[in-house]
Image (cartoon, helix red, strand yellow):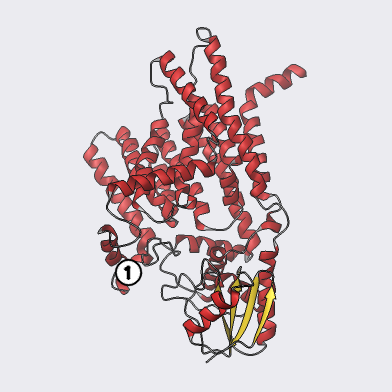
Amino acid sequence: MKKEVIRFFNTNKRKFYLGLILVFGSFLRLYHLEYTLPVDPDAAMALLIAKKIVEENYVLLVGPLTSLSNFNILPPTYYYIISVLYFFFRNYLAIAYCFAIIGIISIYLIYKVGLILIGPKGALTAALVFSASHYMVRHARAVWEPHLVPFFILLAIYFLLLYEKQGKFLLFIISVSAFFVSLMYISSFLLIPGYFMLSFYVLSKKFQNKLLVLSALAVIFSVFFLMIYLPTIIYEINNNYPTWNNLKNYFRGNTIYFKPDFSLIISQIYKNSVLSFDLLKLFPNLLSVVFLFIYLVMHFLLTKRAILPPKIKYMLLLFLPGFFMTGFYQGQPAIHRLNALSLIIIILYAGIGGINRLNLKKYRLFSAISVFLLLGIYGQFLFFTIGEMKNIPWEKISYKDRSVFQTAEYILAKAGQSSFSISTSTPGEPKNYHTTRYIYALEKISGKNLSKMNKKGNWLSSRVQKNKDYIFLICQNYNAANVSTECLKYFLNMEKLPLFLSEKQIGRNIIYQIPGI
C-alpha cells in the first residue's frame, strides 16, 4: 500500500503541487470577500450602466473613461460583459465572485501557458508567483475592467500555442477573439504589435507564402477590430470624429500626455519598469538581483550555449515592443496600465528556472549552487509577498464603505418627497468623480432611477443639476479645519449658489444641504 501511494505521488506530483497552488490562490482571492468588497467609483459606474442596459434597453456606444478623457479609445466591451453578469445575478457581490473565480482560472491558464513555453517546473513557478502576487490578488478581489485583462490575454496566448501544436484554425480564431476582447482596457494596446508578430510567426510555420500570411492576418485583425469597435465608430461618425481630431494633437505633442522627445520616452520606460518590478516584488532587494546575476553568468560560462528555454522568445516578442510603447504615454505611471505586461513579466521571471540545464554528473557542485540561488531568488519573492499580504483588508468592511450607504440613507430622509441632486468633492477629485458611489447606493436603497449620464453615456454628467429643490454636497476626506473653505465655499462660488441650510457629518463625509435655484 505504501509503495502504491509513493508511486501514485511520483506520477501525479505535478498535479498535486498545482492543486496546492490553486487552493492557496483560491483562499487569497475568496477569503472574506463579502466583507471586504469596496464600493469604488468605477465599480459603481459599471453597475449603474449594466442596470440601465438590462432594465432600460440602454444602448452604449463607447467604453469607460480613461486618463485621455477626450479620446474614445476603449470599446464598450467591458460594460456589456458586466451587463451579462448583472442579467444573471442582479447582485454586486455575485459579480465580484465572478471576478475572483476568473482570477483563479487565470492561475490554471498561466500554468498551461508556462507548460508549453518554459516546462513543468517553470509552469508551476509561474502559477505560484501569479497566485501569490499581492498585486494579482488585489486585482481578483475588486470589480474593474483592468482586472479582466490578464485572463483574456492568457486565453489568447494559450489558444495561439494550441493552434501551433494542433493546426486547427478555429483555435487561432478563438485566440484572436480573446485578444480583441482584452482591448476593453488600454493596457492591452501595448501588446498589439507583439501579438501581431507572434501570430505571423506561428502562421508562417503552417503556410509557406509569407506575403499571403501577412495579408490574411491584416484582414483578420481588421475584421475583429471593426466588430469590437463598431459601436465606437458609430459614435465617432455621429459626433464629427472627436477622437481622430484629438489624436492628431496627441502625436504632434500638443497635449500633456505625450511629447515626441526620445529622452522623455526613455525616462517613462524606466519609470514603468521600476514601478512594475516594485509592485510585483519579483526582486524585492539587491540580494535577489545579485543571486540572479551570478546564476545567469554561471550558466552562460559553463554551458556556452543559449541559456533560455527555446520558446521563451515568444514572451520576449510580446514583451519588448509593449514595454517600449509604455514610453508613449507620459502621464503619471500606474501599475494597472501595465497589467497586460505583468503576467508576461511573471512568465519570464518563472522561466529563470528553465535555464538550469547543467549536467549533474559533470557539474555537481555548480548544480547545488544553482539550486541554492534559485531558492534564494524565489524564496525572497515569497517572503516579501507574504509580508505584503497584510495590506489586503482582511478585516470586515471598513467604515468608509459603510458611510456610503449611511450617507445615502441620510440624503433620502432629509429630502423626503422633494427633488434633489448630489455633488461630491475630495481633495484629489474636486469635480464629482466619487458621485457614482452615492448614486449607486441611492438607487439601491430607493429603487429609483437617479443617474443623469454625460453626452457619451459612459459616466455620470459632471454638471450640477441646480434646478432641483435641494443639492446635497458631499465633502469627502477633508480635514475639519479647511473643509468649509476648500470644499463648501469653493463649490458655492463656482456654482453661484446660496448658503447651505444644514450640515451633517458621517464618518469622513460632511454633507451640506443647499437650496436649488
Amino acid type of the residue tagged 1 in the rendering:
Glu
Residue 292, position as x, y percentages in the image? 49, 26
**Can you say whether 247 is above or below 435 in the image?**
above
Question: What residue is shown with label 1?
Answer: 236
Which residue lies at the image location 50% right of the left edge and 20% below the top edge?
Answer: 356
**Can you say whether 470 is above or below 9 in the image?**
below
Which residue lies at the image location 25% right of the left edge and 33% below the top edge?
Answer: 208
Residue 80, position as x, y percentages in the image? 49, 63
Whether residue 185 is visible here, answered yes or no, is: yes
Q: Residue furthest right?
A: 1
**Can you say whether 441 is above or below 68 in the image?**
below
Q: Quadrant of residue 273?
A: top left
Q: Quadrant of residue 206?
A: top left
- Provide the secondary structure element on which disc 1 rests: helix
Q: Quadrant of residue 421?
A: bottom right
Q: Name the foreground residue: 113 vs 412.
A: 412
Which residue lies at the image location 49% right of the left edge and 28% below the top edge?
Answer: 352
Residue 347, position as x, y percentages in the image? 49, 36
Q: Is residue 337 left or right of residue 501?
A: left
Quarter of the figure with the N terminus:
top right
Number of dots carrying numbers: 1
